Image (cartoon, rainbow, N blue to C red):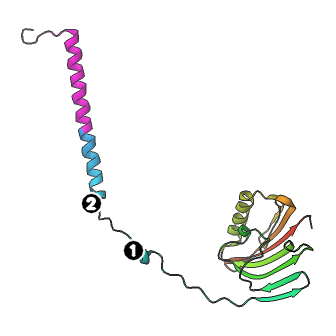
Amino acid sequence: MGLRKRLSKRERLVQLKFVRLLHFLCNGIFFCFLLFGALVPVLAEQETVPSLFDQDPPTRKLPKEKARIFRHNRLTYQESPYKAPASIPSDFVPKDSKILYSTELRSERIFETRESAVVLNHSLSKPRMEIYYETVFGFLNFKVLQNQKSPEKSLYLVEGMNRKTVAISISPDGSGSTVKLFYRKSGGF
C-alpha cells in the first residue's frame, strides 16, 4: 500500500472525469478517421459540370396529318385533330396520345359545349391505362358511378362537379390501348 496514494473523493471524481474525457476523445478521433476514410473516395471523384447540349437531344417533331374538320349546325367532327376538345378535362387525355377522332356538340349558348367525344390510341397497356384513370379520378375528385372490367374492355362512368359526366371505355390494341371518352354536361345519359 505504500506505492499507491489514497485519493480523496473529489480527486477520484476529477480522475474519472479525465478518464471519461480521454475515452470520449479517443472514440471521437476514431470516428473521424472512419468518416474521413469513407469520404475520401467520394471527394476524390472529379466533379464535372454536365453539358447542357448533351443531356437533352433536340426532339424532332414528326409531321402531323392535317386535321379534317366537318361542321353541321352545332356539331363539329374532326379526324386526326391536333388536340382534344376544350370541354374534356386535359388530364383525361394522357400525354403522347394519338387522337384519332373528336366530336363536339355546342349548346345554344355561344361558348358552352354540351357533349363531346374523343377516340385515342396510347402506348400504355390496358391495365396501366386503368390505373392511370383511377388515379386521375381521385386527383380531380370525380365520383365513380359505375365500373365494369373484363379482359376485352373496361368501362367507367364518373361524375364531377357541376354535373359533368364522363364515360370512358378502354380496350387493348396490340401492345397499347384504345380509349373512347364521352363527356356530357348537365345531366345523365
Residue on which disc 1 sits: 51
The quadrant the C terminus occupies is bottom right
| 177 lies above or below 15 | below
Of residues 166 and 179, the one nearer the viewer is: 166
Residue at the left extreme of this rendering: 2
Q: Name the quadrant containing residue 32.
A: top left
Q: Is residue 128 rendered magenta in the image?
A: no
Disc 2 marks which residue? 44
Residue 112, compared with residue 10, is above or below; it is below
Q: Count all numbered tags in the image, as a single digit.
A: 2
Q: Quadrant of the N terminus?
A: top left
Q: Which amino acid does label 2 sit on?
A: Ala
In the visual, does 81 lie left or right of 63? right
Q: In this view, does 120 lie above or below 89?
A: below
Comes first in the chain, label 1 or label 2: 2
Whole-percent x, y for residue 94 in the image:
69, 71
Left or right: 97, with 59 as reference point: right
Residue 112 pos. (x, y %): 86, 71
Considering depth in this image, is 85 or 16 the residue closer to the camera?
A: 85
Q: Closest to the observer: 89 or 36?
A: 89
Label 2 neighbourhood size at 10 Å, few (<14), some (14-19), many (20+)? few
Of all residues, the one furthest to the front in this rendering is 110
Question: Where does the magenta region start and end?
Answer: 5-28
Q: Magenta stretch: dominant SS?
A: helix
Which element is circle 2 on? helix
Separation of marks 1 and 2 at Cα, in angstroms: 21 Å
Q: Which residue is drawn at 29% across and 53% down?
A: 39
**Which residue occupies the foreground of this view, 150 or 113?**
113
Residue at the spot x=91%, y=84% of the render? Answer: 73
As helix, strand or loop, the secondary structure at mark 1 comes to loop
Q: Which amino acid does label 1 sit on?
A: Ser
Q: Please, is residue 179 above or below residue 35 in the view?
A: below
